[in-house]
């Protein structure tokens, strides 16, 4: 395989002894003759126990806890590995005619369980569809296959084309282009380069019935009705399988500047970020850590640390950073820019989640979106609400992505069973913390996710989050996938296969 997913934790027992945590009465098996038909199409298949169990899990933190107890979240019945768009199309045509669920999987780094095949059936592993198809230097556009991993894409862009996508999710080494598009991913340099949905210029998508469609790719900002790229960006494999992505790229930056500041309150730091954005300064990295997280990451005391990094053309970067400094010194104190280097060193370290889970800590992160006018209330109410949940030991946050109209707040919660290490405690503590934050966000009219998406974990909040707009999503689903075979049980969409409120 060109790229191997990195599981956060390994099972401690043999695959034969694993128990399914999400048993589903409507779990669909794949008949032998269907497996044979798929092989006859020239598509590689695998139904070894190891492959079935490994392909059926991702980094959803609650399910990582189950893994430590040798529960597998769910299990597909067959894994298939299409090599190209035509194989995706013929496989879907066949599986749709047999009403067999299909869940796309790639890096399996999702943290909400979106790649977990709740209804069994087929997992379609996209990793053989990898590489750059072509590069348009004049227009700064790259066409890339969906299974291309983060490092493969960025390294090739840099080395061969002197370009960068500027998309740096913390999970860079774990994830793929198709996964980014399917989940509306955000990179750490998003203030300069945007989120993945800002980078998508065109898509090729295979629908549930095998039809191949193309969206976008006609130049910038066309006015031909609604933007069809955006219907499939964030679809989490429920509306179609992305088989090609056209992305906007940038020339490699020639200049970088870094600064750091400390604030007495998180509120003061947020206000500075808001003012920077209002003046049209968009430094690539603009992250504000509350005092607790600042101590954890930077070993500072009682200060809320803002780290800022910009890169690109010197004149633009200097102008942006001058604005940052002008605004930040009003209420903050300048800190050593080594803090930014410290952050750069550790920014892709993904070991913490697995290590904490192993020692019985129930931990997760929750990223939400909100207008500036509601962010302080959300921060205060969500962190205090988490700390009221029995067993909570950590409730902290940082602002990770900022815009003219608002920002993403990224919460971390952790807790331990005060009376031992029971599974009942873990499941209930986890759910309560999520309910606290989601209810605070919904109460204030914020967005329940900024970039991790919905998956299984957030499904139960989607109807409330979308309100009357949910009907449009349902109509799209029923029109594009009338048999409901694509990733059943996700995005809060009802399907004939799965009850939504799992677990
Ligand atoms: C430690 C850690 C840090 C993370 N940091 C970030 C971060 O900074 N920013 C961020 O945005 N996310 C982050 N994530 C979340 C995760 O990496 C992203 O959601 C990523 O986009 C998932 O990509 P993947 O290739 O791993 O997809 P998978 O997990 O395999 O799949 C995710 C979803 O996409 C669907 N899918 C995959 N490929 C396709 C396709 N070709 N067509 C249609 N649907 C498809 C799947 O069905 C599933 O619903 C982090 C995760 C971890 C574990």
Image (cartoon, rainbow, N blue to C red):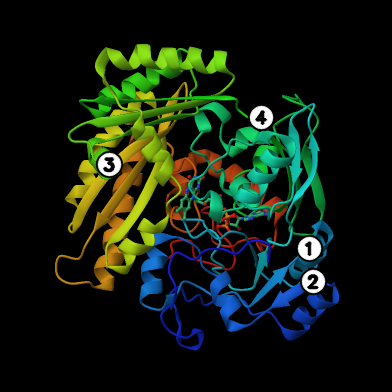
Q: Which class describes the residues within 10 Å of circle 4: few (<14), some (14-19), or many (20+)?
A: some
Quadrant of res 439: top left
Q: Do the residues labelled 3 and 4 touch (CB within 8 Å)?
A: no
Q: Which class describes the residues within 10 Å of circle 3: few (<14), some (14-19), or many (20+)?
A: many
Q: How far apart are marks 1 and 2 (CA)?
A: 7 Å
Q: Which numbered disc, 1 or 3, marks the residue closer to the eye?
A: 3
Between 406 and 470, the residue placed more toward the observer is 406
Residue beneath disc 3: 293
Q: Which numbered dot is residue 43?
A: 2
Which residue occupies 28% across, 72% down?
423
Q: Which numbered disc, 2 or 3, marks the residue closer to the eye?
A: 3
Q: Mark 2 vs mark 4: which is more N-terminal?
A: 2
Q: Identify the secondary structure beneath mark 2.
A: loop
Q: Identify the secondary structure beneath mark 1.
A: loop
Is the distance from the Cβ of mark 4 to the nearest ligand 1 atom less than 8 Å?
Answer: no
Q: Mark 2 vs mark 3: which is more N-terminal?
A: 2
Left or right, 321 with respect to 336, comes to right
Q: Identify the secondary structure beneath mark 3.
A: helix
Q: Mark 1 vs mark 3: which is more N-terminal?
A: 1
Between 291 and 431, the residue placed more toward the observer is 291
Q: Mark 3 vs mark 4: which is more N-terminal?
A: 4
Residue beneath disc 4: 250
Q: Are marks 1 and 2 in contact (CB under 8 Å)?
A: yes
Q: Identify the secondary structure beneath mark 4.
A: strand
Left or right, 234 with respect to 327, comes to right
Which residue occupies 75% across, 54% down?
207
Q: Distance between the residues labelled 2 and 4?
A: 36 Å
Q: Which class describes the residues within 10 Å of circle 1: few (<14), some (14-19), or many (20+)?
A: some
Q: Mark 4 vs mark 1: which is more N-terminal?
A: 1
Residue beneath disc 1: 83
Rendering coords of residue 359 (x, y %): 27, 68
């Amino acid at each position: 395989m060109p790229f191997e997913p990195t599981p956060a934790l390994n099972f401690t027992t043999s695959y034969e002894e694993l128990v399914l945590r999400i048993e589903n009465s409507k779990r669909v098996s794949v008949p032998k003759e269907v497996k044979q038909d798929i092989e006859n199409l020239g598509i590689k298949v695998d139904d070894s126990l190891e492959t079935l169990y490994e392909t059926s899990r991702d980094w959803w933190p609650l399910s990582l806890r189950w893994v430590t107890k040798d529960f597998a979240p769910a299990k597909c019945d067959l894994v298939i590995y299409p090599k190209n768009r035509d194989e995706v199309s013929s496989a879907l045509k066949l599986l749709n005619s047999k009403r067999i669920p299909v869940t796309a999987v790639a890096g399996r780094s999702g943290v909400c369980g979106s790649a977990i095949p709740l209804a069994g059936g087929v997992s379609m592993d996209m990793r053989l569809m990898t590489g750059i198809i072509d590069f348009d230097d004049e227009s700064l556009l790259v066409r890339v296959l969906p299974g291309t991993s983060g490092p493969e894409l960025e390294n090739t862009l840099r080395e061969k084309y002197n370009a960068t996508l500027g998309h740096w999710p913390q999970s860079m080494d774990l994830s793929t282009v198709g996964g980014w598009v399917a989940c509306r991913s955000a990179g750490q340099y998003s203030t300069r380069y945007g989120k993945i949905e800002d980078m998508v210029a065109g898509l090729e998508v295979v629908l549930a019935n095998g039809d191949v469609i193309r969206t976008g790719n006609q130049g910038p900002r066309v006015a031909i009705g609604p933007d069809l790229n955006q219907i499939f960006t964030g679809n989490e494999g429920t509306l179609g399988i992305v088989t090609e992505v056209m992305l906007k790229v940038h020339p490699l930056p020639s200049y970088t500047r870094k600064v750091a500041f400390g604030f007495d309150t998180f509120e003061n730091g947020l206000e500075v970020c808001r003012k920077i954005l209002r003046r049209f300064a968009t430094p690539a990295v603009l992250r504000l850590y509350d005092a607790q997280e600042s101590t954890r990451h930077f070993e500072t005391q009682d200060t809320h640390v803002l780290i800022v990094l910009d890169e690109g053309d010197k004149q633009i970067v200097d102008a942006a950073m001058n604005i940052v400094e002008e605004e930040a010194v009003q209420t903050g104190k300048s800190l050593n820019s080594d803090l930014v280097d410290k952050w750069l060193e550790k920014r892709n370290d993904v070991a913490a989640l697995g290590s904490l889970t192993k020692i019985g800590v129930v931990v997760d992160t929750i990223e939400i979106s909100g207008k500036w006018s509601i962010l302080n209330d959300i921060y205060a109410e969500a962190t205090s609400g988490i700390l009221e949940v029995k067993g909570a030991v950590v409730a902290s946050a940082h602002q990770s992505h900022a815009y003219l109209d608002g920002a993403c707040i990224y919460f971390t919660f952790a807790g331990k069973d005060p009376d031992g290490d029971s599974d009942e405690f873990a499941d209930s503590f986890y759910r309560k913390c999520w309910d606290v934050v989601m209810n605070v966000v919904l109460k204030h009219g914020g967005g329940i996710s900024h970039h991790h998406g919905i998956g299984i974990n957030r499904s139960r909040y989607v109807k409330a989050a979308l309100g009357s707009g949910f009907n449009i999503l349902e109509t799209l689903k029923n029109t594009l996938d009338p048999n409901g075979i694509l990733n059943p049980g996700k995005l809060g969409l009802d399907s004939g296969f799965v009850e939504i409120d799992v677990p």
